[in-house]
Amino acid sequence: KNEVEQSPQNLTAQEGEFITINCSYSVGISALHWLQQHPGGGIVSLFMLSSGKKKHGRLIATINIQEKHSSLHITASHPRDSAVYICAVDKGTYKYIFGTGTRLKVLA
Amino acid sequence: DVKVTQSSRYLVKRTGEKVFLECVQDMDHENMFWYRQDPGLGLRLIYFSYDVKMKEKGDIPEGYSVSREKKERFSLILESASTNQTSMYLCASTPGGDSPLHFGNGTRLTVT
């Protein structure tokens, strides 16, 4: 079993829909990261969380440390949100474990 | 903004060639990483460096070596390229603490 599991693996949504991507992990962590990877490869850091909730524009990330679970929400989705979203956990001492990603496609 | 620059976006090399992948960051970060990304697998750590001339093996170091002679530059070396090293290679850096990872745009390497 992978130490970081994401669901769903693939997601297609209509423009304007509310989207949720989930991440569960099975190890102790110091922080959890949400990353976005556009076609072509570059990865951008969206959030780094160690507790609670963070919001940036239409993106919201939450984490429940007791349940070892995090969610990334996108409100009012747009085609430009189409990307692969990756969850990564920091086990400390720069040992990051990455999920396999959720491929999101938002249709106009 | 932090910039992490990888020298090539695409590379095609022949089996047995020595390959150099270069990564430069402009924010004086101590920590730099080389990952490879393959379909269906998460990013996997090849090597990590926490200071000049310091390095640690990651999860899949076999067939690779690294060099960090200056703080801003972290090079990945494939001593003798093989077809199973065809992959996307991503460099990242961070100052550590409560700071996020900053990634380069990746190098898609094909070994034929």
Image (cartoon, rainbow, N blue to C red):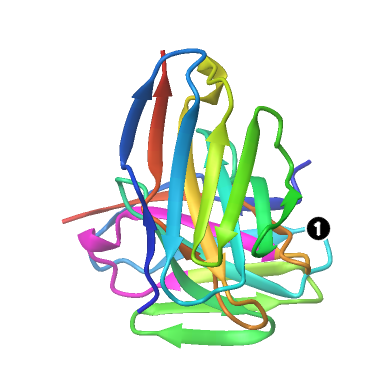
Question: Of all residues shown, which one is farthest toward the front?
Answer: B69
Range drawn in magenta: A73-89
Depth order, front residue of A38/A26 = A38
* Circle 1: residue type: Ser
Is label 1 in a helix, a strand or a loop?
loop
Residue A47 placed where, x, y %? 51, 76
Return the residue at label 1: A26
Residue drawn at x 70%, y 37% is B61
Residue drawn at x 54%, y 25% is B85
Up-down relation of residue A78 to residue B39 (above or below) = below
Residue B79 placed where, x, y %? 59, 26
User: Which chain does tag 1 point to?
Assistant: A
Q: Which corner quadrant of the image does residue B82 belong to?
A: top right
Depth order, front residue of A18/A66 = A66
- Asked if the magenta segment contains residue B23, the reply would be no
Depth order, front residue of B112/A21 = B112
For label 1, the crowd category at 10 Å Cα-Cα, with few meaning under 14, some 14 to 19 and many 20 or more, is some
Residue drawn at x 48%, y 12% is B15
Up-down relation of residue A8 to residue A55 (above or below) = above
Q: Which corner quadrant of the image does residue B26 belong to?
A: bottom left
Position of the C terminus of chain B by quadrant: top left
Left or right? Give the position of B45 relative to B17. right
Residue drawn at x 36%, y 48% is A41
Residue B27 placed where, x, y %? 45, 77
Q: How many marks?
A: 1
- Asked if the magenta segment contains residue A77, the reply would be yes
Position of the N terminus of chain B by quadrant: bottom left
